[in-house]
Structures are given as C-alpha cells and as structure tokens.
Image (cartoon, rainbow, N blue to C red):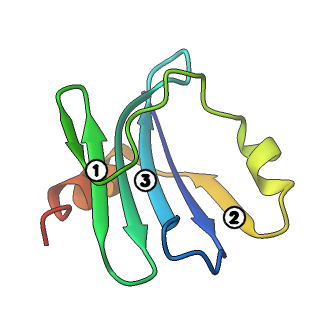
Amino acid sequence: MIYIIWEWDTPHTDEPILTYAELDDARREQRTVSIYRDGRKGFAGAAILVGDRPLSPEPFPQLETLNAHPDVTAREISAQEFEVAWSARHQ
C-alpha cells in the first residue's frame, strides 16, 4: 500500500482542502479522508461513503503531477499517519 496526503489551496467550499488516501499497488484508492475548509469531513472505503467524494476507479496521479499544480502540495506519508486520520474521521 501507498499512503499520501495532499493539500489544495482552493477557495471553493465544496472541495476538500486536505485529503488522505490509501492506494493499492495499482495506485487505486482504497480509503480516503477529506477535510473541508469549514471543518466538515468526508470519507470513503470499499463499503463506506460519507460525503460526496466516492473512491475513484482511476489510478491516482503521481506526486510529481499533483505538485506541478501551483495550489497543490502532495507527499507520501506513513501507514500510521493515515490510520490516525482514518481513526479521527468521525471527530
């Protein structure tokens, strides 16, 4: 598994500003946690969807591709860091 976090400096309140993602070896999302500017959280997994952002069936872009956008910062994180965000998704 690969774990990433990306921050998006967007003024749109209907788009997440921070997203944690767990990706499989084909870079497909397995679980995500999204945090919005107003503090709302959404999350998705194989049998779970809270919010309006389901798991994407497409392979996730490479970090270099994401970081090429001037308003995005993305990096790989540890499984433990992802699990902390996943565990806090209801708070």
> In the image, 37: left or right of 83?
right
Name which quarter of the figure residue 22 lies in: top left
- Crowd tier of the residue under label 1, counting other residues whose Cα lies within 10 Å: few below 14, some 14–19, many 20 or above: many
- What is the CA distance from the residue labelled 3 to the residue labelled 1? 9 Å
Residue indicated by mark 2: 73
Question: Under tag 2, what secondary structure?
Answer: strand
> In the image, 58: left or right of 79?
right
Name which quarter of the figure residue 48 lies in: top left
Instruction: Give the answer, above or below, for where 55 lies relative to 64.
Output: above
Residue depicted at 34% across the width and 57% down the height? 81
Residue depicted at 38% across the width and 84% down the height? 38
Q: Which mark is residue 43?
A: 1
Q: Amino acid at mark 1?
A: Phe
Residue depicted at 76% across the width and 70% down the height? 71
Residue indicated by mark 3: 20
- Seen from the viewer's position, the closer of residues 68 and 14 is 14
